[in-house]
Amino acid sequence: MLKKIFISAVLLLAVLSFVVSLLKGNNNNEKTVTVPDRVAVINIDGTIVCGADSKDSLFNQASVVTSGSIMRQIREAAADDSVKALLLRIDSGGGSATAAEEVGRELARFKEQTKKPIVACMGNMGASAAYWIAACSSDKIYANATTLTGSIGVYMPYMNTEELFKKIGITSDKIKSGPYKDIMTPDRKMTAEEKEILQNIVDEIYDQFVYTVAAGRRMETSKVRAIADGRIYTGRQAKNIGLVDELGDYYDALAAAGALGKINPGKDGLPPVKEKEKQQPWEYFLSAEIAKMIKGQLLEQFQSGFLGTAPAVQNMTR
């Protein structure tokens, strides 16, 4: 009973919030507002993973950011004439090399198409894949003196549980199409040949990481390799070895982005900012897919002049 009441309350809130936002969007009496030149700020907070853009919901609050979400925001900034500079606000210990590569490619496209500056700033952390993103196309990189950054390297985790399985009586039989199809399986030791295969993959990705940093930071590849042994550096140490340009916080980086983009600052000395569009309450309370379905149903009924209880909406939540 309580569960039904809770679901009904959430749906009611979702419906009311959507209707209010829809009515606001259709208010033709609103005055046209001139958008000033501004800096687009993209927050990269949490573990960076590959994946499509997904909006947060009450049921999906993991501390991750997808490459799809970052790339969408980069493209939106590129298409917005009011955006004169891009600021990457990073607080991440890293993540997927593939996700970093995807974002890096999109940043390079932004730079080539718009000729607009990119600035990166790092909070607590900006390491590994996060540093890959910061270094690849940024005109300037800011870090706090105590920021942990660097960690230029690649690793592939592997755990051997063979002895544990033996103790608890678990055996494993496999039928496979080739000798390496079960590579990295945890129930047996890795062979020398398998280690060589995986080491070659790690080395290839590492080389790409090094070349990306060298090109982005305008450093000799040999110099990058000398400091790219996987260790982390403080922001101050990173500045001394060329991985960071300036020590400063978000506001220092924002001011620098505004200056590079030739944006007139406001009374606070900072340029106007464009951030990720805030979600509507009905999008937050529901999962992205359900919210999308409900929005479509409600929009269809609104356009037909009917805003009732919508039995179809209730059926989708069962």
Image (spheres, rainbow, N blue to C red):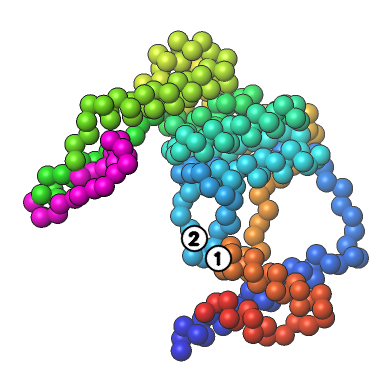
Horizontal and vertical percent position of residue 279: 64, 60
As rendered, which of 196 and 216 lies closer to the eye? 196
Q: What's the amino acid at mark 2?
A: Asn
Residue 201 lies, with reference to residue 165, above or below; the image says: above
Marking on residue 173:
none
As rendered, which of 170 and 291 lies closer to the eye? 170
In the picture of the structure, the residue carrying the numbered disc 2 is: 60
Residue placed at 76% from the left, 78% from the top? 301
Residue 93 as seen in the image, left or right of residue 170: right
CB atoms at circles 1 and 2 under 8 Å apart? yes
Residue 121 lies, with reference to residue 291, above or below; the image says: above
Callout 2: few (<14), some (14-19), or many (20+) C-alpha neighbours within 10 Å? few
Secondary structure type for disc 1: loop
Magenta stretch bounds: 167-187
Residue 192 as seen in the image, left or right of residue 138: left
Callout 1: few (<14), some (14-19), or many (20+) C-alpha neighbours within 10 Å? some
In the picture of the structure, the residue carrying the numbered disc 1 is: 287
Label tally: 2
Residue placed at 64% from the left, 81% from the top? 312
> Which of the 4 image quarters holds residue 181?
top left
> Which of the 4 image quarters holds residue 90?
top right
From this viewpoint, which residue is outermost toward the bottom?
1
Horizontal and vertical percent position of residue 143: 52, 30
Residue 160 as seen in the image, left or right of residue 95: left
Which is the main secondary structure of the residues drawn in magenta?
A: loop
> Which of the 4 image quarters holds residue 257?
top right
Horizontal and vertical percent position of residue 43: 58, 43
